[in-house]
């Protein structure tokens, strides 16, 4: 995860129910339950598919995705901080800055083919200034969508975390321009004080000739 989650009014409780459940189940982060719920609600990942996880540290999403695609699939996870290595051979991780000029080239060096799903859990370092944090969140989500549209195969899926407010509706419209269906999801594991939601783009439209 890039940065830290935003808090709106309620005290931060690092060891809540989902934290304890993640620890019991050997998951690296409570956020694993968020992507698990999304995958159960929408058939965006299956055995043998190739998935990109942006903002993947510490690896909670990667654990769920690795199990979902199985050894016949592939998962690529990147973040601005190092991710503890995985033993599964079908999981590749790297330290990359999505906003760096050479990001696209370095990502292609990790996997040159198309993706069946691009999933972003990136979040900015929060400033406490609502408009600023929303703008930074949208910038990361926008980059994730750019990658999903350029590297996703027709019919692929896109998932991105972002903060509600600001230009959210405009961004949802941009996602709708590329995907046949768009859903807004607030997973049960989301902290009560958080303004974050996930936009889910289903079935990437084929590029115009």
Image (cartoon, helix red, strand yellow):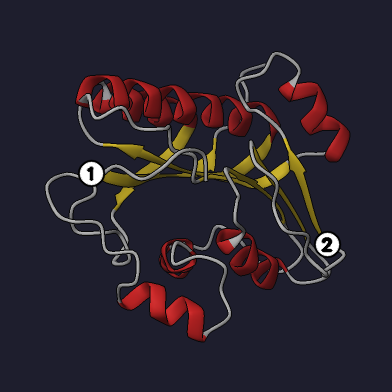
Question: If the image is split into quadrants, where does the C terminus sit?
Answer: top right
N-terminal of the two: label 2 or label 1? 2
Q: Residues within 10 Å of mark 1 (few under 14, many from 20)?
A: some
Picture coordinates of residue 3 (x, y %)? 46, 38
Numbered badge on residue 22? none
Q: Count the marks.
A: 2
> Looking at the image, which is closer to me, 129 or 107?
129
Q: Position of residue 33 (x, y in %)?
A: 44, 69
Which of 111/10 is in front?
A: 10
For disc 1, the marked residue is 195
Residue 144 against residue 77 in the figure, above or below: above
Measuring 44% from the left and 67% from the top, which residue is drawn there? 30
- Identified at 47% across, 36% down, the residue is 179
> Residue 81, located in which quarter of the rendered image?
top right
Against 36, residue 113 (above or below) is above
x, y percent for residue 59: 62, 59
* Secondary structure under the numbered disc 2 in the rendered image: loop
Q: Can the viewer see residue 166 in this picture?
A: no
Q: Residue at x 59, y 68 (%)?
A: 64
Contact? badges 2 and 1 (CB < 8 Å): no
Residue situated in front as seen by the camera: 164 or 203:
164
Farthest left residue? 9
For the residues carrying marks 2 and 1, which lies nearer the camera in this image? 1
Residue at mark 2 to residue at mark 1: CA–CA distance:
33 Å
Residue at the outermost bottom position: 24
Residue behind mark 2: 90
Figure check: 138 above or below 22: above
Left or right for 115, reference 110: left
Q: Position of residue 83 (x, y in %)?
A: 69, 52
Kindly state the secondary structure of the residue where label 1 is placed: loop
Query: Label 2: few (<14), some or many (≥20) within 10 Å?
Result: some
């Amino acid at each position: 995860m890039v940065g830290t989650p935003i808090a709106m009014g309620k005290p931060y409780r690092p060891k809540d129910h989902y934290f304890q459940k993640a620890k019991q189940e050997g998951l690296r982060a409570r956020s694993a339950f968020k992507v698990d719920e999304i995958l159960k609600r929408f058939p965006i990942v299956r055995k043998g598919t190739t998935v990109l996880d942006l903002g993947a540290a510490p690896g909670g999403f990667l654990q769920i995705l690795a199990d979902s695609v199985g050894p016949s699939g592939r998962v690529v996870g990147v973040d601005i901080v190092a991710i503890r290595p995985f033993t599964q051979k079908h999981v590749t991780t790297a330290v990359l800055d999505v906003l760096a000029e050479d990001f696209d080239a370095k990502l292609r060096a990790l996997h040159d083919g198309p993706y069946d799903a691009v999933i972003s859990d990136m979040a900015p370092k929060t400033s406490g200034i609502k408009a600023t944090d929303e703008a930074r969140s949208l910038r990361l989500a926008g980059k994730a969508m750019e990658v999903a549209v350029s590297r996703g195969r027709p019919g692929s899926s896109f998932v991105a975390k972002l903060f509600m407010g600001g230009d959210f509706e405009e961004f949802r419209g941009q996602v709708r321009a590329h995907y046949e269906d768009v859903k807004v999801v607030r997973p049960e594991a989301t902290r009560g004080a958080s303004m974050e939601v996930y936009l889910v783009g289903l079935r990437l439209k084929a590029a115009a000739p």
